[in-house]
Every structure is written in C-alpha cells, then in structure tokens.
Amino acid sequence: MKTAVLLSGGVDSSVALHLLCEQGLRPDLYYIRIGMEGEEFPDCPAEEDIEMVEWLARKYDCPLRIVSLHDEYWDYVVKYMIDTVKAGLTPHPDMMCNRIIKFGYFNEYWGHEYDAIATGHYADKRIIDGIHFLATAKDPIKDQTDFLAQITYPQLVKAAFPLGALPKSEVRQIAKREGLVTAGRKDSQGICFLGKVNYNDFLRKYLGTKVGDIIDFETKKKVGEHEGFWFHTIGQRKGLGLSGGPWFVVRKDIQTNTLFVSRGYDPIEQYGNVVEIGGMNFISIDPMPEDGSPLDITFKVRHTPDFTKGKLIKVPSGYEVRSEALIQGIAPGQYCTIYDSDSSLCYGSGVISGGRKE
C-alpha cells in the first residue's frame, strides 16, 4: 500500500512513522510548511521542525518532501478564524485545518498519488458492514476525534491513524526506546500550525485592542476592564485579571464591547441543557432514525476527555442536542461533536449556533 506520512516534527507523528516502518512499509514523508513565517509571523520559524523530520527521513531511509500550503492556510483557515472572532464567536481552527489543509489541499496536490495518508492523530477507524467509521482512540485524554469530526467520508477512507490503539505514555516509551530525536519534545499547545505564536498575541496583531467594561452579571456593576471581546469566550475562567473570583464569562455584547461575568464555580447563567446546531457534517452515515425519533448519543462541546449523554433531535432550524446534564459554556461558533451512545464511534460535528436551559 502506497502511503504518505504527514510529519510535524513532534513525537506523535514520529512514532506513527516508526510503527508503519515496523509493518514493513517505507512511506513517503511530507512536511507541510504553512502559515506562520516571514514578515507576517516572524516568531514562528519552521527550521527546528524541519531538522527533526530530516533526521527521521535519514533514520528510516524514506524520501522526504517539504511542501507549502501557506496561501491556502491563510486564505481559508486564518481568514475563517479572524472572521469568526470578529463576529463574537469562538472559532475552531484545528478542525478546519484538518479538513481543508491536511486532508484537503494536501490530498488534492500530492496525496491523490497515495492509497493512505497517515498522521499522528490520536484517533482510530473501524469498518462496519464495509463502511469506514471514525472511532475514538484508546487514550481518552489524548483522543482527537473532535478535531477530525469535520472531515469528509473520502478523506476518512484514505486516512490512517497508527496511534489509535496506544496510550500517550506508550508512544513516549517507543520514542525513547527507538532513540528518536523527537522523544523529548513537548506537545504542541497552540493552534494548528501556529507553532510558538500565542493565540492572544495573534489576535492582538490582527484585531488590535479596544478597552471595554467587564460587568458583574448579577449586580450590573463594573468590576474591571478588558482589551477586546475577541480575547474572551463564553465559559472562560482564566485570564480575566479579576480578584475575588473565580469569575466566569457568561455573556458578550459585541455591539458595546462588554463582557458579563459571574462569580463562583456554578453560576447558573453559564449552564444549559440544549445545544443548538445549524447543520451537521455526518462523516460516514446519517445515523438519525428514519421515523424522526431522537437519537441516543454522547457528545462534546469542547476538547475534553469527558462525554455527556444526550439525544440528537432534528428540528426545522437544523439540529438540537438535549443533554441529560447541564453543561457549562456553550459557545456559539465552536463545534458540537456527536458520538454513538457508548462513545466509540464519532458520527461528525456541527457548528454551535446557540444554547439554552429548559
């Protein structure tokens, strides 16, 4: 099977490569040079990553190509991110990067020559009655199916996830045992391909700052100031700079650039049990019952190892998730990822348009 491996310079994709080579494959290696370089992003050099992937190419005797998708990343992922933040919503650039860049334009330009495109994502696949399904990884903390839930079915069929059955601890052990140069590298904490650039610094560079009031939701009194609503998201607890907390962001008024916050760990205003979704990207099948009845599911509204039980319902405006438990911080613009009732198969995801408590 002719396979391409997307290397990032991190430990995960390095071990994914090692595992494929252990199976007797000698895949072609690709490093996608994207985004945060040059005058626009002076703090994000790729040289260290490239040194790592060149070392791996020599060790495993695999051909390496360094390719650029800078323009595509800027035109689609970065523009989406900036436009979403400007609208007062919470973007998910990693989700878009996987669909549009890693499994999208890469496949269009180079990946179409291959039977499989392998990455270091913590995810798995299952084939049931001849249909490919995105499945959750063995490591629930590292599982990244929620980052992959916007990919298309053809992209999934071609995708390979060698790390799906391994916990992160074992991945690190393999890297150390094999003497991989990436064994000690820290996991990336930033946005897809933003590298070392801090998210708020990125927003500050492209959206600037604008001082606004922070208002106590209960008392309606001003308790502080912020530098722009785009730096904050519903449910946020850290980074507000307020004393006497904890404080949570429970609402944003983008017209007046005002943040509303509530004190305490459980202000009821930040909770809801209905997630409103405009439309769903079902990756493999539409799992909704033909009779229109609700579908028993588990779901996530943010990247977390925890699943929440609920029901997915088709409504005139799209879909709604009715949660069995109140959930905190339903953030419009983010994605609600839908799983089967035992949290083993990921059906897909949809953009959150709103939330409410019933």
Image: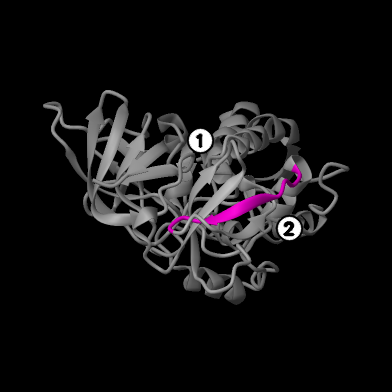
Front-most of residues 252 and 114: 252
The answer to whether residue 112 is visible is yes
Residue 4 drawn at (x, y percent):
59, 42
Viewed as shown, does residue 191 lie left or right of 162?
A: right
Viewed as shown, does residue 353 lie left or right of 176?
A: left
Residue located 61% across and 75% down the image: 176
Above-or-below relation of 351 to 201: above
Q: Tell me the element at label 1.
A: loop
Residue 127 drawn at (x, y percent):
30, 42
Q: Is residue 217 magenta?
A: yes
- What is the quadrant of the C terminus in the image? top left
- The residue pinned by badge 1 equals 115
Q: Amino acid at mark 1?
A: Asp
Q: Nearer the viewer, mark 2 or mark 1?
A: 2
- The residue pinned by badge 2 equals 196
Residue located 63% across and 66% down the image: 241
Label 2 – label 1 distance at C-alpha:
33 Å
Q: Which residues are magenta?
A: 208-218
Residue, far top:
316
The answer to whether residue 24 is visible is no
Q: Is residue 351 magenta?
A: no
Front-most of residues 274 and 153: 274
